[in-house]
Amino acid sequence: MVLTGAEIVVECLKEQGVDTVFGYPGGTILNVYDALYKHSEEIHHILTSHEQGASHAADGYARATGKVGVCLATSGPGATNLVTGIATAYMDSVPMVAITCNVNLPLLGKDTFQEVDIAGITMPITKHNYIVKDVAILADTLRKAFTIAKSGRPGPVLVDITKDVTANSCEYEKQEPEKIVTQKGRYTETELEEAIRLIESAEKPFIYVGGGAVISGAHEEVRAFAKLVDAPVCDTLMGKGVIDGYDERYTGMIGMHGTKASNFGVSECDLLIAMGARFSDRVVGNPKKFAENAKVLHIDIDAAEINKNIRTDVSLVGDLKAVLTELNAKIKEQRHEEWMAHIKELKDKYPLSYDTSALSCPYIMEEIDRVTKGEAVITTDVGQHQMWAAQYYKYTKPRTLLTSGGLGTMGYGLGACIGAKMGQPDKICINIAGDGCFRMNMNELATASRYNIPIIQVVINNHVLGMVRQWQTLFYGKRYSQTVLNDGVDFCKVAEGLGCETILVTKKEEVAPAIEKAIALKKPVLLNCIIPEDDKVFPMVPAGAPISEAFDAGDLES
């Protein structure tokens, strides 16, 4: 049948099983929005308050569901407003397709009104991108975009379409989406045997799990491997939920704000098994002193990550779920009683702790965990609250912590929470944001209220930029340059003005009732939680220091 380019866009979305898109209309993309209007029963469009909110919502939808998230924007500033969200998705390997429309083909390159080279701008932060100048290749381009976004190591793909292409017509024939085949491992039998030899000869193995384990759906294989090898397990911010937070083998997060048990244990191990992790600087600290007593076995789907930050002794390149399935079938069961006993001693000696005398974010996270029975999807912004959310909520399943790990995007969480709720409507979805982050994209509360999306926005309000202030306190002589936010902004009034319910929380005993009420209201609710301005995230490793030098408040006092 003959369709316009705009109609082909919608039909291709339907082909790919897309049920929800996030975006903001404008002049060059009007034809696509007109086509969406006619298919509103099949594709639910969420009009966000800002294009950046749309990109974060598509990201959150993708992380919560494992499906490809989709966002739409017009040309010029509409397209450039997606850039931060695209970069966020790129750094965390999130499958996303961003569809933008540009000026008519004859006007390209002439500084036309609202023209920008969005393909050129996003080239370094997309897995691939396209500019479509011929309606005849539009359908195949969109299909390729979805395949690229979700295959191998996932990532965002941008498709920019000139406006005349959306108006022009051509023959369209429906196709079934290309099946994504798990990549065969790109390693030899010799390399596999060497990996098994390393594992079976280790006396003090330690497993380090990253976001790739979530993406590959390998949590059951990771848990089976840990039991088979009899090893402790730490995770990164992106790897939360792969190992049950209550598992006796679990030692907590590793790195700059990781537990002492994880940081000290990795520093002492004789074999570090990295799974779907990229040895980020926030994990490694000083690379020359990271796991310096250990041989390193690295399993990852992306060959570019091997030996990029840390030299490995053996690497297995392939989909983690497939690699572990093979390893689990071939490894002999191991026992490391002495090593596991030592790790338990570290956990007992260095538990996470905080001041229990006043309202604090750790207490709030523990109460959210208790009230929701650990079944909520938690999104966060970036800073102290993000670390506390990672430390004090017990993630028992993957895809339940959605956070900007690689780019560290302030303002990410609220849009992501809206996207997560649209993808997982039966889940309680809660965004944890500091007051500094919340100011950046709090306009998306209007999106939640417009569609009555029952998310819970928790503002950890200390009236400062908490993480930056912590660094200023510890390393900059308490010179609080531009980090004090103690002004006249009333978040409860703002949220009420945007159509949301609000609850002010100033005492510990108010936390649980507030969470319970927010859940029961089944509408967007803001909890404004006032905490002390100088609460700090511990443990901590100074930037560039070995992770074996993690310190906490007690160490500072002594």
Image: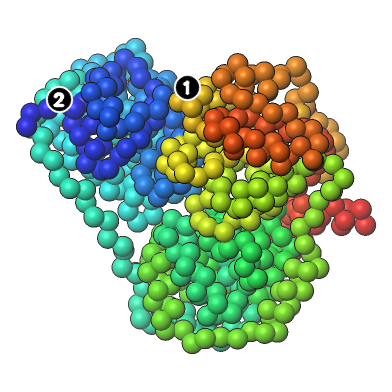
Which of the image's four quarters has the C terminus? bottom right
Q: Position of residue 94 (x, y in %)?
A: 43, 46
* Furthest-right residue in this view: 558
Asked whether the viewer can see residue 488, the reply is yes
Which of the image's four quarters has the N terminus? top left
Q: Residue at x 47, y 79 (%)?
A: 195
Q: Label 2: which residue?
A: 4
Q: Is residue 468 above or below residue 116?
A: below
Q: Position of residue 92 (x, y in %)?
A: 48, 48
Whether residue 393 sits left or right of residue 29 in the image: it is right
Depth check: give the residue in front, 450 or 443.
450
Q: Is residue 198 above or below residue 261?
A: below
Q: Label 1: which residue?
A: 450
Tag 1: Cα neighbours inside 10 Å, few (<14), some, or many (≥20)?
A: some
Specify the amino acid type for callout 1: Arg
Q: Position of residue 232 (x, y in %)?
A: 62, 72
Q: Quadrant of residue 504?
A: top right
Whether residue 554 sits left or right of residue 383 in the image: it is right
Task: Find numbered disc 2 in the image and state the secondary structure of the residue it sits on.
Answer: strand
Asked whether the viewer can see residue 408, the reply is no
Q: Which badge, 1 or 2, comes first in the chain's sequence? A: 2
> Comparing marks 1 and 2, which lies closer to the viewer?
1
Q: Position of residue 546 (x, y in %)?
A: 71, 61
Q: Residue at x 18, y 37 (%)?
A: 139
Distance Cα–Cα, label 1 vs label 2: 31 Å
Task: Find numbered disc 1 in the image and state the secondary structure of the residue it sits on.
Answer: helix
Specify the amino acid type for callout 2: Thr
